[in-house]
Image (tube, rainbow, N blue to C red):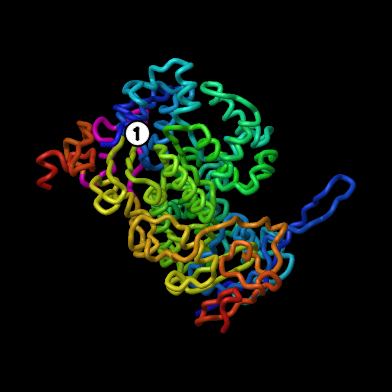
Amino acid sequence: MNELLKVDNLKKFFPITEGSLFQKKIVYLKAMDGVSFQLNQGEILALVGESGSGKSTTAYTIMGLYKPTEGKVFFKGADISVETTKRPLSLKKEIQIVFQDPGTSLNPQRTIRQILELPLRVHKIVPERNINEKVEELLKTVELPSDYMFKYPRMIGGGERQMVAIARVLATNPSLVILDEPTSALDVSIQAKIINMLLQLQRDFKLSYLFITHDLSLMRNVATKMAIMYLGKINEIAPAQEFFTNPLHPYTQMLLSSIPVISKEERNLRPKKIASIGEIPSPVDIPPGCGFHPRCPFKLELCLEKDPQPVEITPGHFVRCFLYKN
Amino acid sequence: MSELLLNINNLMVGYKVFDGLLKVLDGVIVKVNKGERIGIVGETGSGKTTTAKAILRILPRTARILGGEILFQNKDVLKMSRSELSVLRGQGISMIFQDPTASLNPVFTVGSIISDVIRYSRTLSSSNKSSQIKETAIDAFRLASLPDPDRLLANYPFQLSGGMRQRVCIAMALATARDLIIADEPTTNLDVTIQDQVLKLIKELVDKKKTSFILITHSLAVASEMTERIYVMYAGTIIEQANTQDLFEKPYHPYTHALLSCIPKLSGGGIALGIPGRMPNYLNPPLGCRFSPRCPQALPVCEKEKPPLTEIEPGHEVACFLFTTKQGVQQ
């Protein structure tokens, strides 16, 4: 398989000032602390974590909205670890993002047509005279009627707005699409529609997705590869099938056991021996050693002092925990 | 037979807007027995929160009650006087809201907020010493498994995490309510591991105190973990009611079917295509069954008449002509 995106030991620290006016102290919020993964062409990689785990920071750094503190991002083999302003236009066209809330990611003062026209003009996708046709075509791909182009975002429903955001992404024929919780603000019946459309588009346009989410049940039905993030680090990464049948990291097991489900069949799939305790610590004040140890029921003495390195258990299944050895 | 605590009968509520009247609730029927945990499940805009707020009479000014009754311990809440309502809110029913940040006043410490709540409910009954109030507050915090309650009382809401704030709200609700707790999407803003902890806590405490409990949620999965009986709401009407297990194993109503198939399962197997169409406009809702414009199995009668909530199996009620008319059954 062709490697599309490679992230190598990526770090992003945000400086924050603490203390009183006279005793200012700069501390660092370690939003992303050594993240590495690889995304192949045609894959759907799910990046899952709780709020504050650094999954959105990862997405934004890949997009170039943040400059990484350390580490590299490679896209089709080329180093792209700079901000958007320094990226060539041809690269921006290749990587696109869908944000969580279409209510704020679409300009309320523009009609849908104006919203969809902009990327077409900027990247000169079609000649000026064909723009109207192309906008209609885009609306058709996301199954919206073509008279929607005269409407404003506020006039349409939340699900439909997200469809417009997806159409805008498709306008530039990207190869990598980052989806940052695209359905978490929507009802399940609308989510189902959007997810099915995203899967269809992925096949039709040979897209690769980096899917940022906190919904593991949804990812069971969507992802081909899973990565679990906790406090700025990836704890476990595995092919989806393997991940759900054989979750290894205690945090993964805790997450899976916490999911509310509706059937007996699903209930049996949840790991039993682990219960959720504690809360995610502040990323400013990360515990020494393994970041998960204050919540971990299986912690060893070693975990309090040293941070584990990822080990490969089966091909493609990496886990960062001292409980496992090659 | 268990004793009936709350009986909402044919409740109709509308909202006055510029364009006219939004007919939101259209004959809601909900019954809660003593010590029972029930769920009201529906999508955004289906009228779940309006129902909850009507029970406590905390609807916004634009709301109009168009009919029906809400009997709590055989007294109609809709006919209560101000002082009766105070007693109801202070001692009978309490509510846990979706956003704990918005329901705790940011300029007071959590200690003074919870003391106010306790003091207020006490003036209505017995003793009122500040040392006793503090003790009750600490007990309530301890029950809600908040660490170090003594020190916590002096903290402001912003010093606590989201999960802790919601625990404070739970502690407040449990410190005063004797009979019924209503939780409106209590865990929607929380992470999944914290959600699990908070839900387990609520369930344990409600069972221990034998309080009745109404959970309002959009998530069928959360409802399935938390409740004994579920009401499914669609566009301001109750369309199905059953024991939690029966509802998931044998749903009748086409909407319940469609909704269940849209939920992504941990066991995989893909997701259904969603439900076509949109929820009706409340200004001008469909004359008959409100789901009929989106229903794949709609009969001619569905467009003209409202299907009544009818018992099909013991304890399983459905509002759908498919199961109550000859025409439907033959199909």
Rendered position, A90 above or below B298: below
Task: Answer whether residue B276 is magenta in the image.
Answer: yes
Name the residue that disc number 1 marks. B236
For disc 1, the neighbor class at 10 Å (few under 14, some 14 to 19, many from 20) is: many
Q: Amino acid at mark 1?
A: Gly
Q: How many marks?
A: 1
Percent x, y of residue A140? 40, 53
> Horizontal and vertical percent for residue B208?
44, 43
Main structural element of the magenta stretch: helix, strand or loop? loop
The reply, left or right, for residue A213 in relation to residue A195 is right
Query: Is residue B219 placed above or below B21 in the rendered structure?
Result: below
Q: Residue at x 54, y 72 (%)?
A: A237
Start-end of magenta stretch: B275-297
* View extreme (right): residue: A22
Q: Nearer the viewer, residue A91 or B50?
A: B50
Which residue appears at 42% of the width and 37% of the height?
B211
Q: x, y (%) of residue A222?
A: 43, 64
- Residue sitting at x 28%, y 39%: B239
Secondary structure at badge 1 equals loop
Is there any visible trace of residue A139 in the rendered image? yes
- The quadrant the C terminus of chain A occupies is bottom right
